[in-house]
Image: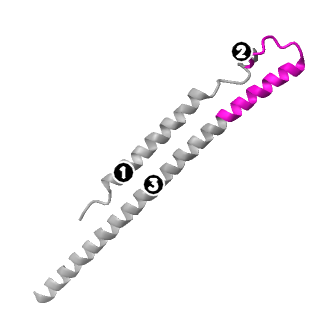
Amino acid sequence: PPPLQGCSSARQLRGAAQRASSDALSVERLRPASLDALDVRSWGGYGEPDDLGGQAAELSLLRARFDLRLDAERLRTQGAAEELRSACEQAIRAEQAAAMRQMAALRSQCAEIEASQRTA
């Protein structure tokens, strides 16, 4: 009987897992190390903030940029997760189909053995 593993479904599953892990690694490249460690003046482009309003505006802009990057990365991660989920479901369906074929072959062999034992 054929093995239960489908080679193409296993390759698809591995490929989807590799793409998902590489997408997860890209998060670290895009995300700033820490909002506390950033020099707000280097991001805002306004020069030296003299008042609290200017600092608050620069912090708001920084936070909006960070949130935008975080949202974009969340969308990429969700897409990778969906692709991985789809590949898993496809692999499961392929494995189930292979198991059903193997079971049918075993039943057929069993019926043939029973028939040959009756005639003997």
The circle on residue 88 is 3
Q: Residue furthest left?
A: 120
**Front label number (3 vs 2):** 2
Question: Label 1's element?
Answer: helix
Magenta segment boundaries in residue numbering: 44-69
Residue 79: give x, y in percent of width and height. Answer: 54, 46
Front-most of 39 and 105? 39
- Name the amino acid type tagged 1: Ala
Element at label 3: helix
State the CA–CA distance, disc 2 to disc 1: 48 Å
Q: Is residue 38 magenta?
A: no
**Considering only order in the chain, which callout, 1 or 2, is on the residue closer to the N terminus?**
1
Measured in 3D between alpha carbons, the distance from the residue under mark 3 to the one under mark 2, in whole angstroms, is 45 Å
Say which residue appears at 42% left-offset and 58% top-offset: 90
Residue 31 at x, y = what percent?
63, 28
Image point (83%, 20%), residue name: 55
Q: Main secondary structure of the magenta part?
A: helix
**Residue 116, quarter of picture:** bottom left
Instruction: Indicate whether residue 45 is drawn in magenta.
Output: yes
Kindly identify the amino acid type of the residue bearing the numbered disc 2: Ser
Above or below — where is 3 with respect to 75? below
Q: Is disc 2 placed on a helix, strand or loop?
A: helix
Disc 3 vs disc 1: Cβ atoms closer than 8 Å?
no
Point out the image quarter for the N terminus.
bottom left
Q: Residues within 10 Å of mark 3 (few under 14, many from 20)?
A: some
Label 1, on which residue?
10
Name the side, left or right, on which 108 lies relative to 44. left
Mark 2 vs mark 1: in front: 2
Q: How is the image coloured?
A: one colour
Rendered residue at 82%/24% (across/down) = 57
Per the image, the residue denoted by label 2 is: 42
Alpha-carbon distance for marks 3 and 1? 9 Å
